[in-house]
Amino acid sequence: MRSKSHESAGAVSGRQPGRHLLREVLGDGSGPPAYIEARWPIVLTVGVAVGLSATLPEHLTFGPTWLAPILEVGLLIPLLLTEPHWHPAAGWPWQRALSTGLFGVLNASNLASLGLLVILLLHGGRASGAQLITDAGKIWMTNILVFGLWYWHLDGGGPRARRVASGPPDFLFPQQSSPAVAAPGWRPTLVDYVYIAFTNATAFSPTDTLPLTPAAKGLMGIQALISLITVALVAARAVNILT
């Protein structure tokens, strides 16, 4: 049964939880509402990234093909078990550290696969056009998903801090620069950060959302460089620059 404070907050707002956002009122309901992001988009994004890396051929993986996925799933499970108990303004520091480790392993695994692909092509490795496009496409897509998670993890001090708007932003979204076009109390969710990663991977530069801090600019620069190398490899092989 919902408490009176939750009922009164729902009556005042007149809003129902959407697919990506759940609303929770801090304290006794007298404070400002905090928007809690649904868990399943994050889990799905991590799962897709793990699946893409796990399906790469053995010669494009560092060590056994099962090593990185097992490690990534092992880091994800404690977060899944404790996530239902997260509070918008609280939590355990080890959870953020574990998330950082998970995204770091995903990133390192993808970088290792890209490095092995570069070595393979530069040293005369043979790969069919279809296989090259498939493998490079998996690395490129993983790059987008992982950096989308990094941006989500970084902006404004992380998802918990954004729920109560307690940290300075690392990205400036159009909805923040023009509040008239945004719904009241708008907060970015994972899909917004994955979109930043996608546009940065295709345009190699910011589009509608601007990085404000050195950390955000550095991450976007690294992601654009990885994307550029991946695309350049496929293009070079396509025009027979690489033998």
Image: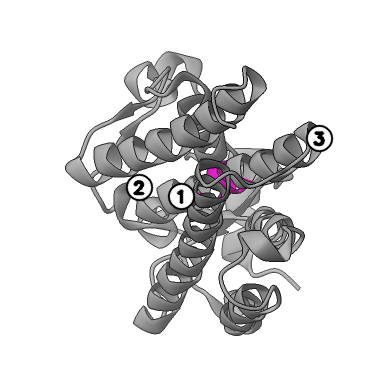
The answer to whether 71 is drawn above or below residue 23 in the figure is below
Q: Secondary structure at mark 1?
A: helix
Which type of secondary structure does the marked residue at label 3 adopt?
helix
Q: Is residue 107 visible?
A: yes
**Is 224 inside the magenta-drawn segment?**
no
The structure residue drawn at horizontal position 58% and vertical position 54%, both measured from the top left corner, is 37
| Residue found 65% across the figure and 45% down from its top | 11
Labelled disc at residue 155: 2
Please indicate whether residue 143 sits to the left or right of residue 64 in the image.
left
For discs 3 and 1, the disc positioned in front in the rendered view:
3
* Tag 1: amino acid: Trp
Across and down, in percent, residue 25 comes to 51, 59
CA distance separating discs 3 and 2? 37 Å
Q: Which residue is mark 3?
A: 130
Q: Quadrant of residue 7?
A: bottom right
Judging by the rendered image, the residue that carries numbered circle 1 is: 152
Q: Residue at x 38, y 57 (%)?
A: 158
Placement of the N terminus among the 4 image quadrants: bottom right
Assess whether mark 2 and mark 1 are in contact (beta carbons under 8 angstroms).
Answer: yes
- Left or right of 17 in this view: 161: left
Compared across the picture, whether 186 is left or right of 89 comes to right
Q: Position of residue 146 (x, y in %)?
A: 53, 52
Q: Residues within 10 Å of mark 1 (few under 14, many from 20)?
A: many
Scheme of image coloration: one colour
Query: Residue sitting at 72 percent across and 55 percent down?
Result: 52
Mark 3 and mark 2 in contact? Answer it, CB < 8 Å. Answer: no
> How far across and down, in percent of the image, does residue 141 sit?
63, 42
Q: In the rendered structure, which disc, 3 or 2, sits on the residue that comes first in sequence? A: 3
What residue span does the magenta drawing correspond to?
142-146
In this rendering, the answer to whether 129 lies above or below 35 is above
